[in-house]
Image (cartoon, grey):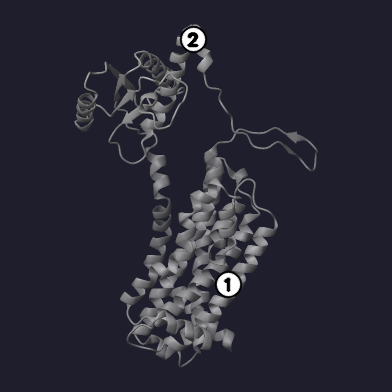
Amino acid sequence: MRMHKIRTIAKRDYIATVRTKAFVFGLVVAPMLFGGGSIAMTLFKGQPDLKDRRVAIVDHTGVVAGALVSAAREKNGRELFDKKTHQQIAPRYVFEVIAPAANSKDQLLALSGRVRRKQLVAFLEIGKDALRPPGPADDPTARVSYYTNAGGIDEMRNWLNGPINDGVRLARLAQLGIDIDRNKGLTASVPIDGLSLVERDEKTGEVHEARKRSELEGFFVPFAVAMILAMIVMVGSAPMLQNVTQDKSQRIVETLLGAATPFELMTGKVVGAVGVSVTSSVLYVLAGTLAVNALGIAGLLPLTIIPWFYVYLLADVVMLCAFAAALGACCSTPQDAQNLAIVLLMPCLIPMFMLVTVLRQPHGTLATVMSLVPPFTPILMLLRQAMPDGVPAWQPWVGLVDVLAFAAATVWAASRIFRVAILMQGKPPRLAEMVRWAMKG
């Protein structure tokens, strides 16, 4: 009888949710909100700003500027045009060599004014001792100073780093009497190819050669898998807070409690939310699989993580929905629920802030410890499992036990809070009261 009531409540909430236009709209909008930046980068990658970048150089050594301009000209030649289409794909860097003035401060002030007036994008000042071997880090005469007011990610500084150092090396070689025109290969960079590991086919014994791979490939799949999980969990659990609060404020729960216990009511709502999340996940997983195949990187997606994906999804949604039901029961108005929404989503937001850190050091102490902390395990452990080298076999199982135990404890505590608070009206309870209800009922 109890299961029938839970199933009826879950069915009612599930159908009421999936039939709404907001649910269908959210299926389309949510991926755009979460992945909009990546989509925009892809769309505008072929439309870069191709305006010339004019840079002034004040060279106190008298010899580095020429070598720097020569190195930059060579880099311009390599990167300016697409090798297949022959279309310009990068901005051209144009250099203006300026003799040092007697009054250095006035000259720097004048050049800064030209940058502010958009006549220059930046200017360089090469110290008089820049050709010496590296000395004290705080010696300005042995450094190259880069002046600009560019905001955000300054790609120009990264671009100039190579030509500047190549120019300094060429000038040092010239001082040693080496003919740099006849020995240009001395400073040439050696390309480094990223390759996968060599593998042996277990059935045939044939050894497969390593294939070329990019850093983007190793980043895209783990990042996308973690983002999809976080998106589904947040979209599936966030409405629970508002729904419970709305039912309470409109006295709907009083009618429902006449036919079901508070535990049955909360459980039914949680099961309905799980059903909505699973429905969304099927669509997103199918779309993600098609996208991976279209990009030609299907081999980078370890199929063994798909069962883990759904285990983490169910545990995370149950945990957050039970928490949301308890918070919603404590709220008397939708405004109260809005104030608590950020608290509900913290178990998803904190791992999202850590994605890049974990991707850089997936086996570091911080990544390992945080992926074993129950509220953060689903997203961070799945991210690490989706990476090419995976994780030690014991870690996902320990994380799973922690998540299931934490989810069970959350449901138990939330049900006790829900039972006490669902019919209360007036001022929202304090945190100490909620803890007391969870412990004593």
| Left or right relative to 367: residue 129 | left
Crowd around label 2: few <14 · some 14–19 · many ≥20 (10 Å): few
Image spot of residue 209 (x, y percent): 70, 32
Judged left or right of residue 199, residue 1 is: left
Q: Amino acid under label 1? A: Phe
| Disc assigned to residue 176 | 2
Q: Residue at x 62, y 60 (%)?
A: 308
Q: Nearer the viewer, residue 313 or 282?
A: 313
In the rendered structure, the answer to whether residue 248 lies left or right of residue 288 reads: left
Q: Which mark is residue 406?
A: 1
What's under tag 2, amino acid-wise? Leu
* The image quarter in which residue 171 lies: top left
- Residue 92 x, y percent position in the rendering: 34, 23
Task: Examine the rendering and report whether any part of residue 265 can be seen.
Answer: no
Tell me which residue sits at (39%, 24%) in the image.
142
Coordinates of residue 232 in the picture (x, y in percent): 48, 62
